[in-house]
Image (spheres, helix red, strand yellow):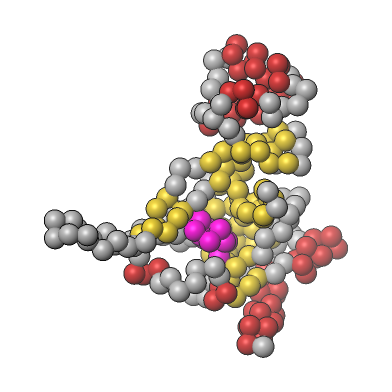
Amino acid sequence: MKRTLIIIVFWFLFVPAIGQTGNGNPIGVSTGSNNNVLNQLQLLDINYAKRGALTYEEIEGSPYIDNFSGADQNLPLGKLYTADMTYITTALVRYNAYTDDMEVSLLEDGVDYYLLKKQPDFLYVVLKDKKYRAFEYEGVLSFFVILSEDDKQACTLLKKEKVVFVQAEKPKSSFVTATAASFKRLRDVYFLKIGDKLYEVPKKKKLFYSLFKGKEEAVKKYMEANQLKHTREQDLLQLVRQYDKL
């Protein structure tokens, strides 16, 4: 009951504010279809996040990806857009790569953060120079960074950011120093969105080429002719830009 009341109260606070930017100026989201998008927007109480009993202040490192912007570079300012890239609002947004959650706070509040509900083919979240969106991979919705110009093309390059929690370790002897609990940033993982499906970029070339059904040889010839490697981000970006022409 308490959770339901919190969400209802925040809903009434958020909907009027979402039609304005941080400085109070109205934004151009007034069509019927856009209103439907706004009506479907849902925020969940952060107290129900997947952090369990963790107290972040007691852990070394951070679960958040540093996407700060603003004049002092310490404000997690983000912009929300509809599925057709119509601007909705500016808010305080931070990406928790440990729980895979977008945490949102109104500019007028700046204290209480709420979780942005993951939905397929829905909102875009722009944090600094990165554009995030929720995609489904192996039956699970998760936030990915869109590296290509957009995610509507035949082949799109995505990136998955992840942070893991490392338990504290007690010293096994007097000669070993104890290790504090910490958050560890893992290496980013690249994905290709081909059609409506996501594929993790494999390490082996043969498996990589097999992702491009019907275009395996064309992709292979293009990459060899241009000396591209499927393990380099810029090379993958060049490939997906040319994919339609292959």
Picture quadrant of residue 219: top right
| Quarter of the figure with the C terminus | top right
User: Residue 66, how many percent across, how many down?
Assistant: 44, 53
Residue at 53% across, 22% down: 229
Is residue 186 shown above or below 117?
A: above
Is residue 41 shown above or below 235?
A: below
Picture quadrant of residue 142: bottom right
Res. 196 visible in picture: yes
User: Residue 5, how many percent across, how many down?
Assistant: 66, 86
| Quarter of the figure with the N terminus | bottom right
Give the residue furthest to the left.
Answer: 175
Give the residue furthest to the bottom.
Answer: 1
Residue at 49% across, 72% down: 52
Res. 241 visible in picture: no
Q: Left or right: where does residue 70 sit relative to residue 145?
A: left
Q: Nearer the viewer, residue 207 or 64?
A: 207
**Main secondary structure of the magenta stretch:** strand
Residue at 57% across, 61% down: 101
User: Is residue 98 found inside the magenta-colored segment of the image?
Assistant: yes
Is residue 80 shown above or below 160?
A: below
User: Residue 105, how many percent across, how many down?
Assistant: 56, 70
Extent of the magenta region: 94-103
User: Is residue 56 found inside the magenta-colored segment of the image?
Assistant: no
Residue at 61% across, 38% down: 200
Picture quadrant of residue 7: bottom right
